[in-house]
Image (cartoon, helix red, strand yellow):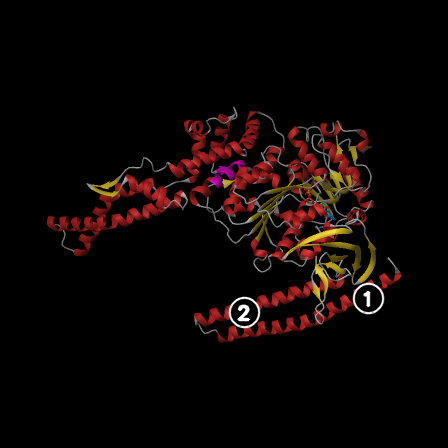
Amino acid sequence: MTDSEREDELLRLNRTLAEIHKQLTAASGKCTEAQVELQNNLTDYWQSYGGNLWDEAQMIEAVERQRSITAVIHQGQVQLKQALSSPYFGRFDFIEETSQETRPEPIYVGLLTLTDRKTGEILVYDWRAPVSGMFYDFERGAACYQAPMGKVNGIITLKRQYKIIQGQMKYMFDSDLKIDDDILQEILSKSVDAKMHTIVTSIQREQNQVIRNDENQLLLVQGPAGSGKTSIALHRIAYLLYRDRKTINAQNILIFSPNHIFSDYISNVLPEMGEENVRQTTFQDYIASFKDLLPIEIESRAAQLEYVLTGRSGKEFAARLVAIHYKTSPEFAGIIDQYLSYYENQLVLDYPDITFGSRMIFSKAEWLDYYLTHFSFLPPLRRLTKIRELIHLRIRPLTHELRRQKEAEIVAAGEEINEQTIKALARVAARQELGGLISQIDKLTQLQPLTLYRRLFTHSTLFKRLSAGTSVPPEWPAICRQTRAWLNQGKMPYEDSPAFLYFQGILAGFPAKNTIKYLVVDEAQDYTVLQYKILGKLFPDCSWTILGDPAQLVHPYIQGIKFEQLSQLAAFANPRMITLSRSYRSTQEIQAFCNALLPAATPVAYLNRRGPLPQVVKFDRLDPAKVLEALQSMQAAGCRSIAVICKTIRQASALHQTLPSHRSISLIVDEDAEFKRGIVIIPAFLAKGLEFDGVLVYNANSDNYCHEQERKLLYTVCTRALHRLMICWNGRPSPFIEVMKKSLYQTN
Ligand SMILES: Nc1ncnc2c1ncn2[C@@H]1O[C@H](COP(=O)(O)OP(=O)(O)OP(=O)(O)O)[C@@H](O)[C@H]1O
């Protein structure tokens, strides 16, 4: 880059900053006006409130309108202030193939579009604008983008990147490569603070195709640990909010995250991009929403995992593991579907005529007609309720008739003369006579989902019929016994909850959320077939982005869904799977170590960012002093965020107690906790999705990580480390480490 080019760039920066200042001044005037207007509206509201509901409704509407105008202006101000610090991060010069112009147009790319209000010239393009996509997708040479009017071809003649901090140009350089690996290395070599950050300046081409995908209603993104799945999901949300800004807002997007610690951890990314945070929820939240509705207490996911990971022994434990595996399987989902289809299609087939004396009230044929045709758009339980209401309507004239008949009988008997008493006695007599009929109708039109679900474990012939032709584990009788024992105590094992809630939803109806237009499911490998079926019912009218990594299944015994199966679960228009190939999080040494933990998998490609070899260290006892020493050495090496990852909640809590300085070290064992800075002790299942400068994997002994099913758990915890990884053990190390090449780590 020549000196005069440098000077031009600095002039351009000053011009851009001057425009932002101008717009900020104008916006602050507008904001004050809007605030005054809002204040006036509120004062009017309180002064004029006179009990007239119509006036009040109008006033509330005016206040709400003013409030949202104020919020929009305020949001604009926040974005301008962000832009004042760093208005853009990239530039490319583009000349359209069909253009008469001979000079390429410089396109500056930043977090928001900025137009010179006087000349109308676009000074900066939002990174999400169609034209900006070329910054991520192309190097110098032929390039194209999809404009609203169609495809535009052309040539990129220059690519430049900038680092502008607090309005000061720190550096700029021309980049031949798309987004230089050097830039990535610089970004990734830093230590991380508490929360995740935007990657907008260095999005990679393979990531960009996910972020800007416009065609597929179901987008499945599979990528190794650290390949940016979560980051991409959030950038995709920002993109959708920009692209569809006239039709959707943050309320129309929902993220399913693994837990609330993770939700908190990613909560800064969208605001950093100038967008409002979207709602996040977890499957556990969905279960919790039934807390007061169900006559049963559902075991928590954490309690189930803790039980499973404590590695007990014995027949009961073994049967529970098989139960978890089987109840989360596609086969079991099929059995539930069959059972439900019985209620859907056959329940009323042999229902009797409802008669009273010689009168036909509701015929066999009507049961079929109403249940299978008229009300077939409703879930079975609601159909039955409707039919009950209908029958009751038909009985009403009969009741009146019967009462009159009874009154006449009482009068004829001459025992009562008081009219009131005659009526009361007639009512009672009529009710008694109709009692049998009413209870017959009630019986026929009631379904108790829990009672029906329970039958799977009590009626062996029913289960045999439903499971015919599928492979049922030999432990099924023990599984039935265990499940019955839970249910008898008013409790339900966590592994039954998706099956039961699906069952309940199909019978009684799902609380469908039609306002959600985009659903994002992160850590998708941890969901089972039935959980996806539930999501499909809850969000019937939306596009899905599903991101996950089958190698990071933290629950050793569940059958997570295979990505290929997902697109078959619902009739998605045009499903597509994109596989990411490269990982960005860890140093080359840590990544190589992690790759070796999964020998069967395709090795993950990684950046050439170097660091020390992971340490596999023998602690004579699991001595707290040694743990502190290890933590101090990581801190001395510049790690700001450090996690000691234990296998279970119990191990994490016990370790926390033994550390003399445990007050300055946070213990996270609750799924609803906030993400903490500094040093944390955390169980493996809560660490997923998070990352830390340094990770100490505690107690990686042969008795802790030994079963094949626990391999992925160990892989997941090791891949949380960016710069330093230490694994400590005593007794004997995990066999997964023992068989590894010694050159992949150092020892003490
Ligand atoms: N293009 C990029 N530029 C800079 N940093 C990136 C890029 N892509 C990913 N990263 C960084 O890599 C790290 C891992 O990203 P992220 O957590 O989104 O990956 P992931 O695939 O969801 O990981 P995991 O499956 O292990 O939870 C983060 O620090 C993220 O900021």
- From the top left corner, tell me how far across and down residue 96 is, in percent: 72, 57
Near-viewer residue (115 or 309): 115
Q: Which residue position is annotated with label 1?
A: 11
Q: Magenta region: which residues?
A: 491-502
Could you tell me which residue is drawn at 24 percent across and 41 percent down? 355
Quarter holding the C terminus is top right
Near-viewer residue (445 or 108): 108
Q: What main secondary structure does the magenta stretch of the protein show?
A: helix
- Is any part of residue 622 visible from this angle? no
Could you tell me which residue is drawn at 13 percent across and 54 percent down? 417
Query: Label 1 sits on what residue type?
Result: Leu
Q: Mark 2, residues whose alpha carbon is within 10 Å: few (<14), some, or many (≥20)?
A: many
**230 up-or-down from 475: above or below:** below
Could you tell me which residue is drawn at 88 percent across and 61 percent down? 3
Near-viewer residue (638 or 557): 557
Q: Mark 1, residues whose alpha carbon is within 10 Å: few (<14), some, or many (≥20)?
A: few
**In the picture provided, is 612 more to the left or to the right than 248?**
right
Judging from the image, what secondary structure is the residue with disc 2 in?
Answer: helix
- The answer to whether the residue labelled 1 contacts the one labelled 2, judged by CB atoms less than 8 Å apart, is no
Query: Label 2 sits on what residue type?
Result: Val
For disc 1, does the CB lie below 8 Å from ligand 1?
Answer: no
**In the picture provided, is 533 more to the left or to the right than 675?**
left
Q: Which residue position is annotated with label 2?
A: 63
- From the top left corner, tell me how far across and down residue 492 is, in percent: 50, 37
Q: Residue furthest top?
A: 474
Instruction: Calculate the distance from the C-alpha at mark 1 to the C-alpha at mark 2.
Output: 44 Å
- From the top left corner, tell me how far across and down residue 481 is, in percent: 48, 28
For disc 2, does the CB lie below 8 Å from ligand 1?
Answer: no
Query: Image quarter for residue 268?
Result: bottom right
Instruction: Residue 77: give its label.
Output: none
